[in-house]
């Protein structure tokens, strides 16, 4: 029995619904297409999700007027709800400078990813003019809900090229850190603690099974840089020759290896882009990322960070987000590969050989 099937088999049996996910009180039931056959049971995981933004048209219109009053040039009419936004609700609105985004923050945080409006505002101000982040227009709090408005970054391509992401992350990691503020400090011991916190919210025996695979926490001379904190494909807007990072609600100060590991994560690539990076794409990223010592530190820390992502995927699945189910399997397979150093080195050599092979 696979790790995923064994994990899902311990959720209570649920009823099938042939409709999109619907909320019953604060309880969300999975639609029929998300039902999983696991351990002989039909499983419909359930979770709770707080309301994170105005829902009715009238309340949204009043909210938009209040935000527009605090953001000169913002149009209060015609707000369009955008898809995506796994933690917050996002709207497109008109602005005198062009299309704008209004993000309304939800109240919750996950064990790995904080959701801090003040940190996002601070970081966008800090990176103004760099091209690495969208231009901040305004931020505030209305009706008990924090919000931010920034200029919409228009994509110039369907997907970001790994080499462009690598170079942009390299630029970000050489930016000076904000002079003051509350940015969290991310270290490997803290990353381990975050994984254990996630496992505390996972049912047994799956939590024990993942905990038993915990790698050693390496003792590294960790660098300190400004980190995006969540540079996954859904938070990267591709330009013609570079990228712009969005969703800065969980920035941090720490070693660049954390951002690199998240971008390369098979789970995060699967959730946001549909599949893990190919070996050639990962090799292209590594070749383009300018800080070679950071890549070496990543190789030493990657087993721990892969295990950490397994814990996070399990935590998400336990709350009904089955988009992370394939990611859990992919991270588990990667950890197994990393546990065999000779095989891991051979895979890296194969990546370079595939990249250097002439096109036919």
Image (cartoon, rainbow, N blue to C red):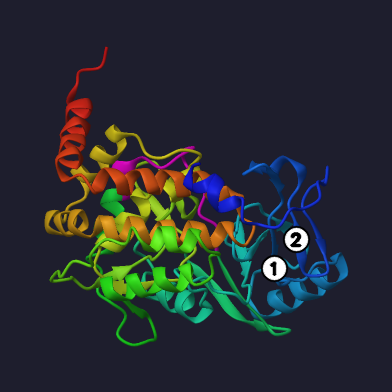
Q: Please name the residue that numbered disc 1 is placed on.
A: 49
Residue drawn at the location 14% of the way across and 40% of the way down: 342
Using the image, tell me which numbered label, if any, was put on residue 299.
Answer: none
Left or right: residue 285 versus residue 194 is left
Q: Residue at x 50, y 70 (%)?
A: 136
Residue 249 in percent (x, y) is at: 48, 71
Judging by the rendered image, the residue that carries numbered circle 2 is: 28
Quadrant of the drawing holding the C terminus: top left
Residue at x 48%, y 77% (from the top left corner): 121
Left or right side of 15 for 320: left
Q: Is 247 drawn above or below residue 345 in the view shown?
A: below
Residue stretch in magenta:
151-165
Q: Decide: is 219 above or below 329.
A: below
| Most foreground residue, 318 or 224 | 318
Please check the rendered image and state whether residue 285 is part of the magenta-colored stretch, yes or no.
Answer: no
Residue at the right extreme of this rendering:
58
Residue 37 position, x and y percent, is 66, 40
Crowding at mark 1 (Cα within 10 Å: few <14, some 14-19, many 20+): some
Q: Position of residue 299 (x, y in %)?
A: 19, 53
Q: Secondary structure at mark 2?
A: strand
Q: Nearer the viewer, residue 119 or 1?
A: 1
């Amino acid at each position: 029995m696979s790790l995923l099937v064994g994990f899902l088999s311990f959720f209570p049996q649920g009823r099938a619904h042939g409709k999109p996910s619907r909320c019953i009180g604060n309880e969300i039931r999975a639609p029929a297409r998300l039902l999983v056959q696991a351990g002989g049971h039909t499983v419909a995981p359930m979770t709770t999700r707080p309301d994170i933004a105005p829902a009715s048209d009238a309340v949204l219109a009043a909210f938009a007027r209040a935000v527009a009053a605090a953001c000169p040039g913002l149009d209060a009419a015609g707000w369009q709800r955008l898809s995506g936004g796994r933690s917050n609700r996002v709207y497109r609105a008109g602005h005198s400078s062009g299309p704008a985004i209004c993000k309304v923050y939800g109240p919750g945080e996950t064990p790995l990813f904080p959701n801090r409006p003040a940190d996002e505002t601070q970081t966008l101000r800090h990176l103004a003019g760099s091209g690495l982040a969208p231009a901040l227009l305004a931020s505030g709090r209305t009706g008990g809900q924090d919000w931010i408005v920034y200029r919409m970054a228009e994509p110039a391509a369907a997907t970001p090229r790994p080499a462009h992401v690598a170079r942009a992350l390299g630029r970000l990691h050489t930016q000076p850190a904000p002079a003051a503020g509350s940015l969290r400090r991310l270290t490997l011991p803290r990353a381990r603690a975050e994984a254990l916190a996630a496992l505390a919210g996972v049912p047994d025996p799956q939590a024990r099974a993942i905990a038993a695979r915990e790698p050693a926490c390496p003792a590294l001379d960790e660098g300190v840089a400004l980190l995006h904190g969540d540079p996954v494909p859904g938070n990267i807007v591709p330009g013609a020759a570079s990228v712009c990072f969005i969703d800065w609600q969980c920035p941090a100060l720490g070693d660049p290896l954390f951002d690199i590991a998240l971008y390369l994560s098979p789970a995060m690539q699967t959730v946001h882009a549909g599949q893990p990076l190919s070996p050639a794409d990962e090799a292209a990223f590594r070749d383009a990322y300018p800080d070679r010592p950071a890549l070496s530190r990543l190789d030493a820390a990657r087993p721990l960070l892969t295990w950490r992502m397994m814990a996070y995927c399990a935590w998400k699945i336990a709350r009904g987000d089955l988009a992370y189910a394939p990611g859990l399997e992919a991270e588990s397979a990667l950890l197994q590969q990393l546990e065999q150093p000779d095989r891991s080195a051979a895979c890296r050599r194969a990546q370079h050989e595939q990249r250097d092979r002439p096109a036919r």
